[in-house]
Structures are given as structure tokens and as C-alpha cells.
Amino acid sequence: MNASVIGSEPYISDDEVVSRLPGMTKGNLAQLRYTGKGPKFYKPSPRIVLYKWSDVQNWIEDHAQTKTR
């Protein structure tokens, strides 16, 4: 696991997010960042993108569906 701990919750890489979400790819995650439709992320430098797993989980919960469209 690639996790950096600052405060009480570790930050995880996009690789870790992709490994925890079936069907998600790094490309999909990058597109969601670009369009502003993905989970909250942190960018401490131009080449580093980090997430908090709780932010990813909240994003998933915010997109819960009860039927198909």
C-alpha cells in the first residue's frame, strides 16, 4: 500500500484507489479529475495526486442509485 500519513488519515495514491474500485482505471480517474466529477483529491506537486479513502467513499455514496436511468 502506498500511503503517506499526515494527520489521522493516510493519503493514498491513484494506484491504490484503482486497486480498491473494481472497473476503475487510472485513465478514468484522471478524466474524472479533469472534469471535476470525481472524488476530492490533493495535488501537492504537479506529478503527485493523492486521495483520502474517506473522500472516495463519500463520492461513491453521493452517486448511489436506486434505479437505472
Image: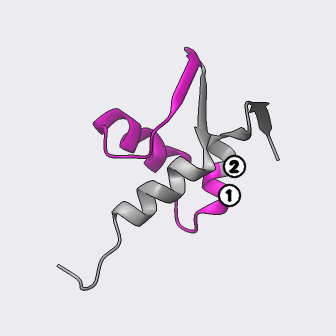
Most foreground residue, 26 or 68: 68
Q: Position of residue 35 (x, y in %)?
A: 29, 38
Q: How is the image coloured?
A: one colour
Please tell me whether residue 15 is drawn above or below residue 6 in the rendered image: below
Q: Position of residue 36 (x, y in %)?
A: 31, 38
Most foreground residue, 31 or 42: 42
Q: Can you tell which quarter of the image residue 40 is in?
A: top left
* Residue at 68% from the left image edge and 58% from the top image edge: 19
Q: How many marks?
A: 2
Q: Which residues are magenta?
A: 17-45
Look at the image and tell me whether residue 66 can be seen.
yes
In this picture, residue 58 sits left or right of residue 4: left
Q: Which mark is residue 19?
A: 1
Most foreground residue, 4 or 28: 4
Q: Position of residue 48 (x, y in %)?
A: 62, 23
Q: Would you name the residue on which mark 2 appears?
A: 16
Q: CA distance from mark 1 to mark 2?
A: 5 Å
Few, some or many C-alpha atoms within 10 Å of disc 2 (few <14, some 14-19, many ≥20)? some
Contact, mark 1 vs mark 2 (Cβ under 8 Å): yes
Dot 1 amino acid type:
Ser
Q: Can you tell which quarter of the image residue 60 is in?
A: bottom left
Residue 35 drawn in magenta: yes
